[in-house]
Image (spheres, rainbow, N blue to C red):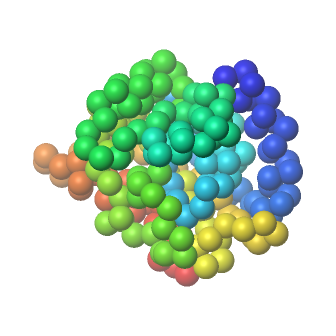
Amino acid sequence: MKLYNFIIAILKYPVKLLFRVKVEGKENEPDTPYIVYGNHSSYVDPVLVTVALKANPVWMGKRELMKYAFLRWIFKVTGSIPINREGLDTNALRKCLATVKEGNCLGIFPQGTRLRRIKPTPQQAHAGLAFIAAMAKATVLPVSIVTKRNQPGMFRKTRIIIHKPIPYEEYSSISKSPSKEEITEYLFSKVCEPFDSN
């Protein structure tokens, strides 16, 4: 993780410059541990969110990326958690819970895959976000990546909006006995708010 911290320290300002990153709501980032989650339209999204935060999240990523040597190295250096999207990956879920309980920040893209040039909506999010958050009783931090045509690119303006954190007590009590799907949609609706106003 020390190498991860060093790499982010080196990349932070070049990435912000190249992607014209404007970070809004820095004051909303809580102390770790917490789960950060956002909309996903590009491979660069984890980097954009990470350079906007004080904490360096441990990201979840699809296991298929591990077939590339460079990405295997990235997973190793950053401590990222590969997950099998076919069925329930209990090993990956245990690692996610351990990450939060050990005092680290966990990063999740609840849409499960990149949705390029598609406006994010609450219904796109998968229930895994609520499952992990509820199991860990973790505070969650919504982050919106807002770009032209919903596709980050170099030299385009990128807004990273850090919303107010949502404590376990809030999302676990949105109804008398909320389902994981209801909680996930509630949480992801916060990420979608800036897109509704566009």
* Quadrant in which residue 148 is drawn: bottom right
Picture coordinates of residue 7 (x, y %)? Answer: 78, 34
Residue 26 shows in this picture: no
Image position of 68 with respect to 77: above or below: below
Residue at point 54%, 41% (across, down): 67
Residue occupying image coordinates x 72% and y 68%: 153
Q: Residue at x 66, y 55 (%)?
A: 44
Quadrant (top left, top right, bottom left, bottom right) of the C terminus: bottom right
Residue 69 in the image, given as x and y percentages of width and height: 64, 38
Q: Residue 122 at x, y = what percent?
A: 36, 65
Q: Is residue 82 above or below residue 23?
A: above
In this rendering, position of residue 137 left or right of residue 7: left
Relative image position of residue 79 (x, y in whole percent):
58, 28
> Does residue 151 appear left or right of residue 21 in this picture?
left
- Residue closest to the eye, 80 or 63: 63
Left or right of 161 on screen, residue 164:
left
The answer to which image quadrant residue 147 occupies is bottom right
Q: Residue at x 38, y 31 (%)?
A: 92
Above or below residue 104? Residue 173 is below
Residue 84 vs residue 166, the one in the foreground:
84
